[in-house]
Amino acid sequence: MKVVLIGVGQAGGKIAQALAEFDYDRGFEAVQGAFAVNTARADLQNLDIDTMLIGQDRVKGHGVGGDNELGAEIMQAEATEVMDELDGRVTSEADAVFVVAGLGGGTGSGGAPMLARELKRVYTMPIYGLAVLPGRDEGAIYQANAGRSLKTFTREADSVLVIDNDAWKTSEESIEEGFAAINDRIAERVGLLLAAGEIVEGVGESVVDSSEIINTLKNGGIASLGYASALADEDAGENINAITSTARKALLTGTSLPQAVEADKALLVIAGHPDRIARKGVERARKWLEEETGSLEVRGGDFPLSSERIAALVLLGGVERSQRVQEFMDRAREASKQQEDPQESAEDAFQNDELDDLM
C-alpha cells in the first residue's frame, strides 16, 4: 500500500520518520513521502524528513504548551500554507495519506484532526489517522487532550489506527526508553502492514494488496493492529500450528489496543517464506478470527518474505465499541472534569458530548 506520511507534533514527526526509515531500509517502497509539521522549532531540528514550522506569529517557535485548542487554531489559520507545502508530495501514485500524531500533547492532538479535515476536502484518496494514546501514568492534561482529539479525529478522518502507549511498552523500560521503543515497534508493525503487496519475494498463493486494507478500514471509526511472530519449520506442513498460534497471539496479546477484539471487519496477513506458509494453517487461523471477532467480513492473504520466521498481522476495523476504548474515554472524561466539570453525563463517553469537540 503506497502512502504519504504527515507527522503532526513531536511524536507524530518522530513516528513518521521511523516509518519512513523502516520502509527505506527494507526497500519496500510503500512510503512515497514523509513530512513533519510542528509549532516547536526544536522538535523539527532533529528530524531528517522534510519539515514545516507553523504558528510563528502566535508561539514564536516554542510550541503550544499542551494547549490543543491553540494547536487546532494554528493549523486552521495556516491550513492553506500547509496544503501548499503538500502540493506535489501527495501524488496520484499514493493509495492513501496517513496523518500521524501523538494525542496527548498540544500540536498533534489539536492539529491532526484539523489537517485531516482539510486533506479530505482536497483529495479523493482515503485520509487515515495513525494516533498514539498516552499511557495510564501520563498526566491528566494528556488524557483529556487525547479524549477530545480522538473524538474529533475519528470523525474527520476516514479511519484512525490507534496505538495505546501501554500496549507495546515493556515494564523494564523507562519512560524515555519506552517512547523510543514504541516508535520502533510502531514502525515495524505498521510498516509491514503498509508494505504488504508492494514487494513480493517469491509467489504467494493469495497476496494482500492495498484494496484489502482500504476495504477493512472502509466503515471508518477506530482501527487496531495486532502482531506476533514465531520461528517456522522448513516444511510448510509442520507450520500449521505455528500459524494458528501466531494469529491467536497477534489478536489476544499483541494488539495496539489490548482487549479490543470485537470488530466490524478484519484482515489477517501471514508474512513469511512462501514455501513455509501452510494453507491449512492460514484457513484455520482465518476461521478462528471470524469466530473471535464476531465479524462476518474477514479478509486474508500472504505477504511473501525471505525469512525464517512466520509473522501474523491482524488489522481490525470498527473497534470503537471495545472495552479498552470505553475505558480510555472514561479516563479522559474524568481527567477533563479536573479542568472543567461538565453539566451532564451519559453512559457512553465516546458517543456523547461530555468531552467537548475540538472544532
Image (tube, rainbow, N blue to C red):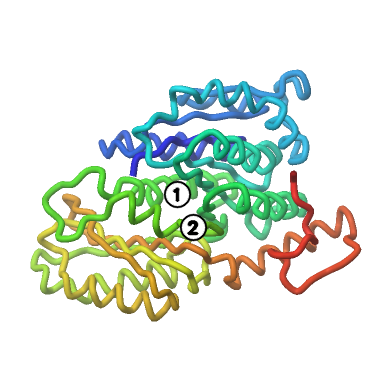
| Disc 1 from disc 2: Cα separation | 8 Å
Per the image, the residue denoted by label 2 is: 168
Q: Residue at x 57, y 26 (%)?
A: 83
Image check: 72 left or right of 317?
Answer: right
Q: Residue at x 75, y 53 (%)?
A: 144
- Residue 260: % across, % down: 52, 69
Reply above or below: 273 against 86: below
Q: Amino acid at mark 1?
A: Ile
Residue furthest out toward the bottom: 291
How would you rate the neighbour count of disc 2 (Cα within 10 Å): few for under 14, some for 14-19, many for 20 or more? many
Image check: 256 left or right of 137?
Answer: left
Q: Quadrant of the N terminus?
A: top left
How many numbered callouts?
A: 2
- Residue 210: % across, % down: 33, 49
Q: Residue at x 42, y 41 (%)?
A: 96
Which sits earlier in the primary sequence, circle 1 or circle 2? Answer: 2
Image check: 302 left or right of 63?
Answer: left
- Secondary element under disc 2, as helix, strand or loop, is loop
The part of the image, by quadrant, that contains residue 271 is bottom left
Per the image, the residue denoted by label 1 is: 186
Q: Amino acid at mark 2?
A: Trp
Front residue of this view, candidates 359 and 68: 359
- Residue 269: % across, % down: 30, 60
The part of the image, by quadrant, that contains residue 324 is bottom right
How would you rate the neighbour count of disc 1 (Cα within 10 Å): few for under 14, some for 14-19, many for 20 or more? many
Q: Are marks 1 and 2 in contact (CB under 8 Å)?
A: yes
